């Protein structure tokens, strides 16, 4: 019998189906043996559970559930130690603190204090109760003592009084020790003519004498710082009247009346003074105990010199 191609294909399919069904039956029977139960006699035998198989692949996650209620608040924890900011942080905090202080200061209303300076003196007569060095209204610095202006002082020989004209004009020494105020200042402060001169003298035995003169003044340099004095009173004797109306003489400026010598150089150096020809007094002469002429001299008391201390001062009304 001749079989067509179409029928042959149908037969192949049937055979394949039969074989597939046979294999499936064998697999099913094998599975029933492993679990010791088959569907045919399941009602007639005991069932025994087999071993648990391997975990399968996790399935897809389900939908997100509803949010639960918040739990109770727990107990407060123990406070930890403060952390260190390090050296940079410490410096930063210092600067912030300082900035805060500055802001506090600048925002505080300042208190205004007015200080009234003491008025300058016109003369030492305005400082009768204040002794010491003062600067006057005209700018001159002077030593005031009980209302008097001290312009010459000798006491220990610490200052050299053998000086030239310019130094006697401007002044020298220290007001705390021996000094000469200066002819320019003496002229400015006495030119009114209404001044008194007081001279105090001590010898080396500490014996004290004094001489007072009214009408004291000194001319300016164009008139050679000429001396003017009035009437005398005192205990030392009038040794200055001989020098009244005499110009000032220094070792380098001979203005005295002696034609043979410069009286400022007489007897080994006498310092500047209002010499005639030559002197009855020389309070700027050489300091020392010796009675040899050329020492500090006040003829009516110490005709051969030898005074230890002198002080010359004036007061103008």
Image: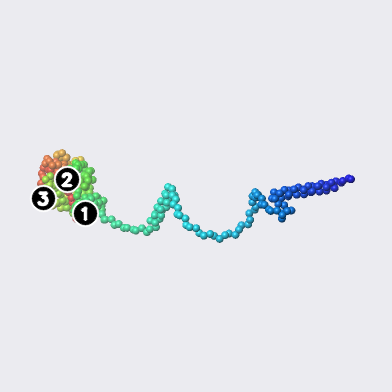
Residue occupying the far bottom of the picture: 69
Label 1 SS: loop
Specify few, some or many for label 3: CA neighbours under 10 Å numbering under 14, 14-19, or 20 or more: some
Marker count (numbered): 3
Task: Report the residue at 22% width, 43% height from top.
Answer: 167
Q: Which mark is residue 130?
A: 1
For the residues labelled 2 and 1, the Cα–Cα distance comes to 22 Å
Specify few, some or many for label 2: CA neighbours under 10 Å numbering under 14, 14-19, or 20 or more: some
In the displayed structure image, the side of residue 151 where residue 7 appears, left or right = right
Instruction: Give the residue at mark 2.
Output: 155
Of 17 and 71, which appears nearest the observer?
17
> Can you see residue 67?
yes
In the displayed structure image, the side of residue 189 where residue 56 appears, left or right = right
Task: Report the residue at 44% width, 50% height from top.
Answer: 83
Specify few, some or many for label 1: CA neighbours under 10 Å numbering under 14, 14-19, or 20 or more: some
Q: Which mark is residue 235?
A: 3
Mark nearer the N terminus (2 vs 1): 1
Please identify the quadrant where the C terminus is shown.
bottom left
């Amino acid at each position: 019998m001749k079989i067509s191609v179409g029928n042959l294909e149908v037969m192949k399919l049937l055979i394949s189906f039969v074989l597939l069904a046979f294999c499936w039956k064998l697999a099913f029977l094998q599975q029933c043996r492993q679990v010791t139960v088959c569907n045919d006699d399941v009602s007639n035998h005991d069932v025994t559970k087999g071993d648990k198989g391997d975990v399968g692949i996790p399935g897809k996650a389900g939908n997100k559930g509803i949010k639960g209620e918040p739990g109770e608040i727990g107990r407060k924890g123990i406070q930890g130690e403060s952390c260190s900011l390090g050296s940079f942080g410490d410096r930063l905090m210092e600067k912030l603190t300082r900035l805060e202080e500055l802001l506090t200061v600048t925002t505080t209303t300042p208190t205004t204090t007015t200080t009234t300076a003491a008025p300058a003196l016109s003369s030492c007569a305005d400082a009768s109760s204040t002794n010491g060095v003062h600067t006057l209204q005209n700018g001159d610095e002077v030593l005031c003592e009980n209302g008097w202006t001290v312009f010459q002082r000798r006491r220990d020989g610490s200052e050299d009084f053998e000086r030239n004209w310019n130094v006697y004009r401007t002044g020298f020494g220290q007001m705390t020790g021996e000094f000469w105020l200066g002819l320019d200042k003496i002229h400015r402060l006495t030119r009114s003519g209404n001044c008194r001169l007081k001279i105090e003298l001590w010898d080396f035995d500490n014996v004290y004498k004094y001489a007072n003169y009214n009408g004291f003044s000194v001319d300016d340099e164009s008139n050679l710082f000429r001396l003017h004095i009035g009437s005398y009173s005192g205990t030392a004797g009038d040794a200055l009247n001989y020098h009244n109306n005499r110009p000032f003489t220094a070792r380098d400026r001979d203005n005295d009346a002696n034609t043979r010598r410069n009286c400022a150089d007489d007897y080994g150096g006498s310092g500047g003074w209002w010499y005639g020809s030559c002197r009855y007094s020389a309070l700027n002469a050489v300091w020392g105990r010796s009675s040899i002429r050329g020492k500090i001299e006040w003829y009516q008391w110490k005709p051969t010199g030898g005074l230890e201390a002198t002080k010359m001062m004036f007061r103008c009304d």
